[in-house]
Image: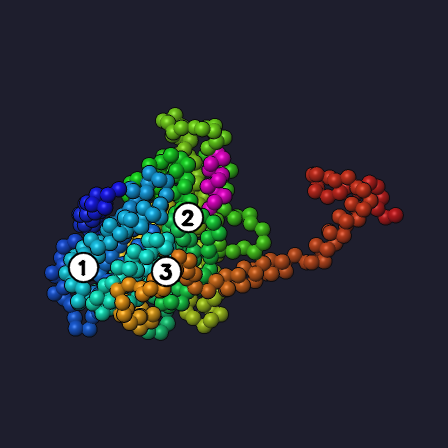
Amino acid sequence: MAMSSLRLRLALNLKLRSVAAVSFARRWPGTRCTAGHADERHATSSANEQLILGIESSCDETGAAVVSTTRGLLGEALASQTESHAKHGGVVPDLARDLHVAAMDDVVAEALRDANVSPEQLTAVAVTIGPGLSLCLKVGVAKATKLAHQYQLSFIPVHHMEAHALVARMPLHDDGGGGGGGGGGGGEDAVPSARARFPFICVLASGGHNLVTLCRGVGSHTILGLCLDDAMGEAFEKTARLLHLDASGPGGGGAALEKFATLGNPKAFPNLPVPLRNQRGPKTCDFSFAGLKTSVRMALEKELGEGWAPSDENASVRADLAAGFQRCAVKHLEERTDRACEWAKSLCKRDGLPAPRQLVLAGGVAANSSVRASIERICGANDLELVAPPPRWCTDNGVMVAWCGAERLLRDDGVLAPPETAEPLEGEKYDLRARWPLGDDAPRRELAEEAARARKAMTPSSHKRGNARAAAARMAKGAPYDRRKRVHAPLGDESS
């Protein structure tokens, strides 16, 4: 694909996103529009504010935004690659890198123009350095390094998942700069008007990540649950492909599956499993969606045969499976989140922290209405307030990176001096972290083992040893196996 063609398509996409943002702002009055009103916003600047440019390129979205430490979001721009990757059935790293390269300069320029800010007015540039695709991360880091060197700006490396969690704290423009999200949290907060107050629970569900954390503060996160295989968003995408749904629209395969599921009966396939419900060993808050996806594939082959093709005749079967898959996946998320809420409260009590009073739902899957309704039920049962970013900030974007940079700048935490060169010297490399744990997960294992010990204590060990000895004695006498009782039946009188 020619580079000029890429630039033209991405320029058109940026224009369309700006137009869409106007209608979005009407639907969500608590958010800033990405186009227009720049002069008005710039006129209200204060002497002590700091401006941060955020750059995101970890996967298949090229995003940039400018935020103020006193006024929140000033401007943003985003170029999506969803349509380009849909025909390949997933993100192609080389193609994603090329699209980032083609879009990056225009996206950054659009964000600055929308904010009515020049690079010289910036205080810092924040950029995602991981986790993500290294080929893609490099494009954003290279642009950020070049800008920071050229204009002598502070450089702030950002963790992609922390950015997802913290963007929910960013005050919306109608918050009035005071109050906050009504949450708890002890000590002084560098953002008095934050919508989510530390400590809070964060459920992150996206195409590449699935985890539950206890967010104690900026840079301080305790992992309560991780994904063991496919993330929830990835499972939605793969299941959409199994069902032959069109994933080229906004939201990709996940949005297509959610829409298609409304046509089906979620209980038509009762044998679809809720993942890990019958797991052996310690009960955890970990997630697994690969088995559920496989169950859908097997059900499709059983109902429609191998080599089936989508048609109007089998649409009802596919819709029922879509609805059943979504029901089981959401139930799995709900059950694990409920346990994570208990664990988070226990950890806060142990560590002398106030109990969390808010739960943040972030990531692209947070836009799913069934997921939101499910998490709202969990919040109600655990006396928590649900805080979620507007839907357009749930997927990857520059706003979350810029705001995460602002949080760190306000605390002077992880802020680096301007780079000495515009690119690495010979023998040096950009700091890219394709794999980068968000926080400590030792308490996750400790709590699971503690719960397992508690359950084990409920069954006397002497009773277990007695059963084992009796079974061994029957086997030694050659007793036949009684399948109904799952024991070896006695041959006769055992008293001898």
Q: Earlier in the sequence, mark 2 or mark 3?
A: 2
Residue 229 versus residue 294 in the image, above or below: below
Residue highlighted by disc 1: 112
Q: Earlier in the sequence, mark 3 or mark 1?
A: 1
Q: Residue furthest top?
A: 313
- In the image, 10 versus 264, the foreground residue is 10
In the visual, does 361 lie left or right of 1? right
Residue highlighted by disc 3: 432
- Viewer-nearest of labels 3 and 1? 3
Q: Secondary structure at mark 3?
A: loop
- In the image, 223 versus 127, the foreground residue is 127
Disc 3 residue type? Leu
- In the image, 34 versus 151, the foreground residue is 151
Disc 2 residue type? Met
Q: Earlier in the sequence, mark 2 or mark 1?
A: 1
Q: Residue furthest right?
A: 496
Disc 1 residue type? Leu
- In the image, 183 versus 296, the foreground residue is 296
Residue 139: percent from the left, percent from the top?
A: 29, 56
Q: Which mark is residue 232?
A: 2
* Residue drawn at the location 42% of the way across and 49% of the way down: 231
Q: Give the extent of the magenta segment.
A: 289-299
* Residue 20 in sight here: no
In the visual, does 354 lie left or right of 277? left
